[in-house]
Image (cartoon, grey):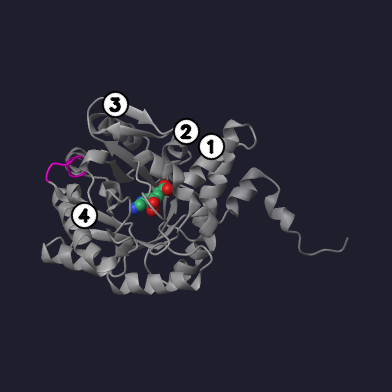
């Protein structure tokens, strides 16, 4: 055959393939989500997320120490709150010394070098299981905003450097930015959950926190999976309101959205490889239907290739154990 162009020449051996490799994963790309609960000396495995547990703070500190030894330097933290402490205004979320604020405080005292995304949303503390105040079956946007602002300031006071509003209320990034600045936390950043879709892939997370909505769904605030241009609108608003990172969530089923925001913003883009995406790979691997390790690497790589600079993933520890760097 008379062919000048032969792309296979660049794939002929491992060194050649490595030379032309366009994206490389590093543990530095990954942020590890963790779950904390009240009590001591307890670890509760999450059935729908093999390899992931909820820890009491004492054991969580040990777990984080092990992760840091493996090179993980960034984390996200979510609390499980007992049903008896939930109410319609999420009042537990700003109580001094609650399990979440105490964890933020102790973790930053113990590991000052790390960055941990702290979650601003009502759902773990809400008796309705929603991310906003509920009245007559409606989610009331503007009554939710001051609650979110108070939560953000309480977390900054406890030591958080990075606030993650995961609620999808309109205007929350601006309100949180103002509240942080008024309280002189000008250095506390905001990683906005910019394009957060009403997804079926959050199921295992809601198991982990027992935070599923008590009625209805989240479609009046989370985005419709059919929409792409609307993600740009959310991104423009979050940029104007002072976000420091834009996040797309979920990740694997939304690679086009990651790429879109990357091309239309100069902020770093984060992607949340959510619980259901993790569970799918784990379940198939446990059945021997796919190679779990290869599928993990391939899916994380796809998020990076699409434009994610930070990947929140339950695979972080498993990836770190491979010692790829
Ligand atoms: C809610 C929240 C959710 C997740 C993170 N924050 C679920 C939801 O919107 O119901 C999901 C994360 C995951 O599935 O891994 N504030």
Query: Circle 1: is it few (<14), some (14-19), or many (20+) Cα within 10 Å?
Result: many
Q: Earlier in the sequence, mark 1 or mark 4?
A: 4
Q: Is residue 84 left or right of residue 239?
A: left
| Residue for point 48% across, 61% down | 307
Query: Circle 3: is it few (<14), some (14-19), or many (20+) Cα within 10 Å?
Result: some
The quadrant of the image that shows the N terminus is bottom right
Tell me the CA gap for discs 1 and 3. Answer: 24 Å
| Residue for point 58% across, 53% down | 21
Q: Earlier in the sequence, mark 1 or mark 2?
A: 2
The quadrant of the image that shows the C terminus is top left
Tell me the CA gap for discs 2 and 4. Answer: 33 Å
Q: Nearer the viewer, residue 207 or 262?
A: 207
The reply to whether discs 1 and 3 touch (Cβ–Cβ < 8 Å) is no
Stretch in magenta: 96-102
> Badge 3 is on which residue?
42
Q: Which mark is residue 282?
A: 1
Determine if residue 23 is in view.
no
| 39 lies above or below 137 | above
> Badge 2 is on which residue?
50
Q: Nearer the viewer, residue 35 or 170?
A: 170
Query: Circle 2: is it few (<14), some (14-19), or many (20+) Cα within 10 Å?
Result: some
**Magenta span has 43?**
no
Tell me the CA gap for discs 3 and 4. Answer: 29 Å
The reply to whether discs 2 and 4 touch (Cβ–Cβ < 8 Å) is no
Q: Earlier in the sequence, mark 3 or mark 2?
A: 3
Q: Earlier in the sequence, mark 3 or mark 4?
A: 3
Residue 56: image quadrant is top left
- Dot 1 falls on a residue whose secondary structure is helix
Q: Earlier in the sequence, mark 2 or mark 4?
A: 2
Q: Is residue 47 left or right of residue 174?
A: right
């Amino acid at each position: 055959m008379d062919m000048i162009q032969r792309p296979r020449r660049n794939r002929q051996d491992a060194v050649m393939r490595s030379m032309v490799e366009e994206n490389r994963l590093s543990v530095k790309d990954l942020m590890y989500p963790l779950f904390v609960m009240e009590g001591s000396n307890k670890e509760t495995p999450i059935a729908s997320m093999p390899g992931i547990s909820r820890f009491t703070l004492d054991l969580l500190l040990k777990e984080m120490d092990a992760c840091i030894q493996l090179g993980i330097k960034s984390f996200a933290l979510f609390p499980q709150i007992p049903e008896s402490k939930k109410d319609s205004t999420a009042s537990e979320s700003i109580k001094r010394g609650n399990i979440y604020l105490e964890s933020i405080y102790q973790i930053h005292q113990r590991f000052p070098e790390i960055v941990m995304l702290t979650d601003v949303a009502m759902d773990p503390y809400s008796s309705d299981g929603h991310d906003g105040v509920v009245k007559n079956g409606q989610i009331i946007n503007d009554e939710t905003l001051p609650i979110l602002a108070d939560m953000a300031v309480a977390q900054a006071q406890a030591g958080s450097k990075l606030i993650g509003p995961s609620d999808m209320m309109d205007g929350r990034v601006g309100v949180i930015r103002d509240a942080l600045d008024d309280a002189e936390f000008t250095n506390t950043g905001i990683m906005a959950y910019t394009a957060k879709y009403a997804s079926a892939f959050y199921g295992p997370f809601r198991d982990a926190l027992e935070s599923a909505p008590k009625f209805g769904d989240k479609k009046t605030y989370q985005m419709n999976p059919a929409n792409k241009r609307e993600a740009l609108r959310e991104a423009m608003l979050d940029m104007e309101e002072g976000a420091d990172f834009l996040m797309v969530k979920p990740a694997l089923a939304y690679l086009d959205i990651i790429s879109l925001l990357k091309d239309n913003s100069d902020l770093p883009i984060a992607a949340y490889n959510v619980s259901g995406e993790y569970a799918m790979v784990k379940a198939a691997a446990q059945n021997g239907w796919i190679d779990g390790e290869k599928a993990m690497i391939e899916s994380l790589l796809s998020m990076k290739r699409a434009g994610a600079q930070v990947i929140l993933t339950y695979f972080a520890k498993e990836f770190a154990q491979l010692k790829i760097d």
